Image: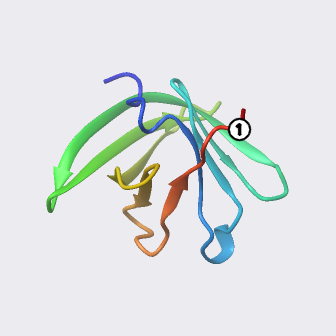
Amino acid sequence: MKHPPGHLVGQWQTETGPYADDTLEILSDRIIFRSKDDTGQVYTISSVREGVEQGRVTYSILYHGADLEPQELMLYYQPAGNGVVIFRHQPQLKWTKQRRHM
């Protein structure tokens, strides 16, 4: 698929370790990694693959920056609560989806 599914779109935060208060923002066509000092790196999403690994829903988000060098973010998705994502390479970190402020 070209775009991430709706349940992945939004802002995600973790309260764990050095990434506490950092934000991962997934949009329909971009992914933004923003640190607590509000500096961010914006990338364009090329494609998204959905799968199942060890009984868990997985997503592979392929993206690139201005240099067009392809990168991949592999994550597990859990629908509990407002949603949780866990990066495959950092299973100790749980990123929770932030509710929209009205």
Q: What colouring style does the render use?
A: rainbow
* Furthest-right residue in this view: 37
Placement of 59 over or under 95, stated as above or below: above
Out of 100 and 37, give the one closest to the viewer: 100
Q: Quadrant of residue 48?
A: top left
Residue 100: x %, y % from top left: 64, 38
Q: Quadrant of residue 91?
A: bottom left
99 vs 88, left or right, is: right
Mark 1 lies on residue: 101
Q: Secondary structure at mark 1?
A: loop
Badge 1: few (under 14), some or many (20 or more) residues near its Cα, within 10 Å? few
Residue 40: x %, y % from top left: 75, 45
Residue at point 41%, 30% (across, down):
4
Placement of 5 over or under 99, stated as above or below: above
Out of 18 and 12, give the one closest to the viewer: 12
Residue 89: x %, y % from top left: 41, 66
